[in-house]
Image (cartoon, rainbow, N blue to C red):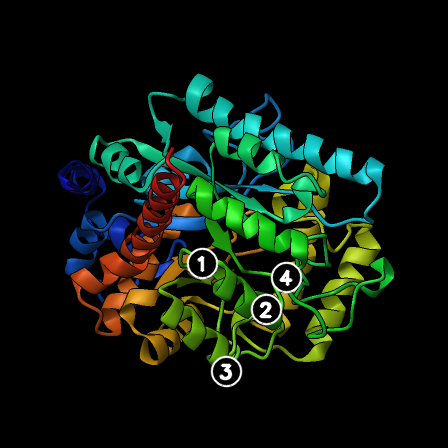
Amino acid sequence: MKRCKLVSALHRMGTAGAAALCLLLAGCGGTPPPEAPDPRVAAVHAAALTLDTHVDIPLDFATPAVDPLGADLQVNLEKMAAGGFDAAFFIVYVPQTARTAENYAQAQADALTKFAAIRRMAEELYSERIEIAHTAGDVERIAAAGKLVAAIGVENGYVIGTQLSLLDRYHALGARYFGLVHNGDNDLAHSAQPRQELGDAPPGSAGVTELGAQVIARLNELGVMVDVSHASKRSALEAMQLSRAPVIASHSSVRALTDHPRNMDDETLQALRDDGGVIQVVAFESYLKTQPPQRAAAVRELRDRLAIPSTLGVDDMSAEQRAAYDGGMLDIEGRWPRASVTELVDHIDYAVRLIGIDHVGISSDFGGGGGVVGWDDAAETPNVTAELLRRGYDEAQIAKLWSGNLLRVWREAERVAAELADSDGR
């Protein structure tokens, strides 16, 4: 299935040779690594279907301002090809705001803008390079044909407001997973990070609402995966109980290693395993490594000084904001080094030991604040495979982590939808 990708990878090695690959795999900029990387890395990485479940996009994506081919983003089509980054869920995300009629309408308009942008990228601008997958089987078919794969995920059920029927519209536009909640409660579920200024319930005091239960039931009927990342522990556990299909955590990490409210504790991870689901361990700095409070304060001060809201991802910043922010972060990171691929795989290792290799995957949250030293954009993706190999994972296990487990859950969501349709006589 992956012969085209392997041949392409080996061909690219021909002129630049092993030295270029060394630079890519070691993430060492212009300085050659002290020793050559494991010669298996290129072959194992090329053989795996690499799928990232969470790539955020700016609101002006796939316009003249932000060309998906080569724009200054952590994920563009050129970087995907260079890094053997086969497939990504591009995300329809809107931030949580006060629940008013005007804000519901704005959230839905922004969601439709992002759906249109993803489809424009794949169907109009670069149809020869990338194609949208509507089924798990599509992902494998498109990748085997030598094209990049786009899938669509929704982050924050706020995009439906209180209108259940919008789920059908978003499914028709390509949504294949649906995140119930984001930072702040909405009408569907309680958030892992409730927001007092929006009048949210205290942490841990609420779960899935009655409307949220109806949403989960309809997602099951549509074959859309239920995503519990950003949900409170109670919301996540209730979603697993309510859903007929396994759920996913599209971009979360392990709370036992980093005590962050966005991470999953052992009880929730074990429930996810028993549910048949998968956690996509995410390369997000603050979820992977506990930093001293001084670092967080320095980042807040930097954002305040540059008038950059905390909700604004790096790919949504203007060029001027991004340049100033990156300059400020260089100083901060010099004092308090960032998390790296090592910490990312520490979290993967922990989850694998606790719940098994069949229930763990990988995500980046590129464009939404994700990225660690060694995997800071799509072109650096082989570094993750290299670290997995170094830890002793074999080719089959790496294939499961990169896509096999997620595709299994996606297929199960499709199977449940077909079963529900049959039981209704449709």
The image's mark for residue 256 is 3
Q: Nearer the viewer, mark 4 or mark 2?
A: 4
Q: What is the quadrant of residue 184 in the picture?
A: bottom right
In the rendered view of the protein, which quadrant contains the N terminus? top left
For marks 4 and 2 on the same chain, the one whose residue lies earlier in the sequence: 4
Q: Which residue is mark 1?
A: 248
Contact (Cβ within 8 Å) of mark 4 with mark 1: no
Local crowd at mark 4 within 10 Å, few (<14), some, or many (≥20)? many
For marks 1 and 2 on the same chain, the one whose residue lies earlier in the sequence: 1
**Label 2 element class:** helix
Asked whether, in this view, residue 26 is left or right of residue 170, the answer is left
**Label 4 element class:** loop
Q: Identify the amino acid type marked 4.
A: Val
**Label 3 element class:** loop
Local crowd at mark 3 within 10 Å, few (<14), some, or many (≥20)? some
Asked whether, in this view, residue 306 is left or right of residue 77, the answer is right
The image's mark for residue 141 is none
Q: CA distance from mark 1 to mark 2?
A: 21 Å
For marks 4 and 1 on the same chain, the one whose residue lies earlier in the sequence: 4
Q: CA distance from mark 3 to mark 4?
A: 24 Å
Q: Position of residue 229 (x, y in %)?
A: 55, 60
Q: CA distance from mark 4 to mark 1?
A: 16 Å
**Label 1 element class:** strand
In this rendering, the answer to whether 15 lies above or below 413 is: above
The image's mark for residue 208 is 4
Q: Which residue is mark 2?
A: 286
In this rendering, the answer to whether 38 lies above or below 123 is: below
Name which residue lies at 54% across and 78% down.
Answer: 258
Contact (Cβ within 8 Å) of mark 1 with mark 2: no
Q: CA distance from mark 4 to mark 2?
A: 26 Å
Q: Nearer the viewer, residue 181 or 166?
A: 166
